[in-house]
Image: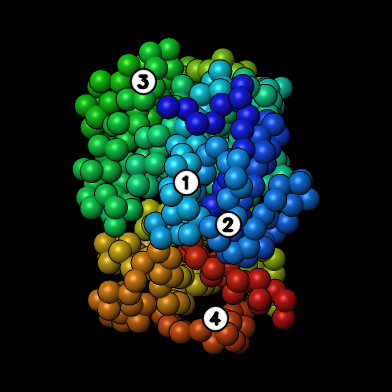
Amino acid sequence: MKYIDYSAPCRVHFIGIGGISMSGFAKLLHNKGFIVSGSDSARNENTEVLEEMGIKCFYPNKAENIPGECKVVVYSAAVSKDNPELKEAERRGIPVIDRAEMVGDIMLHYNRSVSVAGTHGKTTTTSMMSLIFLEEGLDPTVSVGGVLDAIGGNFRDGDLGNMVIESCEYTDSFLKFHPTHALITNIEAEHLDYFKNLENERESFKKFAGLLPENGLLVVEKSIPDYITLFKDVKCPVINYSLSDTTADYYAADVTYDEYDRGSFMLMHKGEPVIRLSLSVVGEHNVSNATGAAALALEMGISGEAVAKGIGKFTGTKRRFEKKGEFKGVTIIDDYAHHPTEMTATLKAAAQYPHRKIWCTFQPHTYSRTISFKDEICEALSLADRVVLLDIYAAREKDPGTISSLMLTEEMKSRFGKETYYFSSFSEAEKFLSDSCEPGDLLITMGAGNVVKIGEDLLEH
């Protein structure tokens, strides 16, 4: 059943409206004529923008916040089952849907709904696709998991022709979507607190691909293990791409990098050159992301010129190898990487970036991920010259007492002989880094938590 219908706008209430994604969709529905309200634990910059638009926001969550004429309540993943507004909506018999189901309803209104999925690279590839669409002169609706300056944030409200959306597999949320076109960048073990193992995660991606209609399209990275078997029952055509495999439908050839590790390459299609693409972001992993985005765009009938311009104009999103500034001659880069594959890609890119020594200040993200990938995390960190470790960012989890950053510190020293330091507070880490980093060093703050604050604090001193 579709609860969000553009042809019949109704009153919608958002629980957790202050989240970056929820606030974007609240704006969208407001613009489409829905009467929107919402609540959160406290006012933030997102809710302030919503209030300026005339959207009523309540603080904190209370049962009486839900309007009497409310027709549907939407809640975010951060909302607990004992939330008073959630319980009140259920008591009053108001339909309650999660964010993913709402997004699925919204996607049905667009002629083409493009989902970008994968364990890594979703935000970057979604952003590239969005800029390509804009360069083609299209007016896409965009939802991306990072702040993209070109659209003024993480959300863009366009016409009903095209929607481009970053699609996350966690808790199988993307299985509630309705894509017509999809790109899968990779499938690796991740979110094991939910999936338990890689096979369950692969099964989720298989079901996701099965959502595509016969007249749709699936573009996949060719190195995904046994992808042909995994997607053999998909109803639509399947196109593959690769960073270097010349048997792929699309691949990168004649790849070169400038002094800042920004790639340039010839995009090939079935052995024939299509167009040369030059990136404004660093690393081999972004050459792969650009190849996938270009493949999907060209298959959708978008011009090569728009593909080249869109990819060239992408300078990154917030927290993806983002240069924050310099202090005492030390360059500070911030990166969201928290999975070993992402960490490795970031530190390999850093190795090609001008530097004297690479300092990596890492904040592990969730206990379950740290337990599952302890060895791989240490291997990735060993690519840095100096490592500073902070306490694990718990996010939604409780400390099991079986893993800690201090354990990782000892592992780094004993296994790799790497200079590694552990600090239990940001202030201690900041003082140490301020005293220890030297002019010409590259300092990377890395992790999906709030480690970015360390670099920002150093820049203020």
The disc at residue 238 is 3
Q: Residue at x 21, y 26 (%)?
A: 229
Mark 3 and mark 4: span between their CA atoms?
47 Å
Q: Tell me which residue sits at (35%, 82%) in the image.
A: 406
Question: What numbered label is drawn on residue 64?
Answer: 2
User: Viewer-proximal residue, 141 or 356?
Assistant: 141
In the picture of the structure, the residue carrying the numbered disc 4 is 426
Q: Amino acid at mark 4?
A: Phe
The earlier-in-sequence mark between 4 and 2 is 2
Residue 92 got which mark? 1
Q: Secondary structure at mark 1?
A: loop
Closest to the camera, between mark 4 and mark 1, is: 1
Q: Is residue 340 left or right of residue 292?
A: left
Q: Tell which circle, 3 or 1, labels the residue nearer the N-terminal end.
A: 1
Q: Alpha-carbon neighbours of circle 2 within 10 Å: few (<14), some, or many (≥20)?
A: few
The earlier-in-sequence mark between 3 and 4 is 3
Spatial distance from mark 4 to mark 1, Cα to Cα?
46 Å
How far separated are the C-alphas under marks 2 and 1?
12 Å
Which residue appears at 46% of the width and 21% of the height?
Answer: 180
- The three-letter amino acid code for the residue at tag 3 is Val
- Residue 372 spot, x, y in % from top left: 26, 62
Of badges 4 and 2, the one in the foreground is: 2
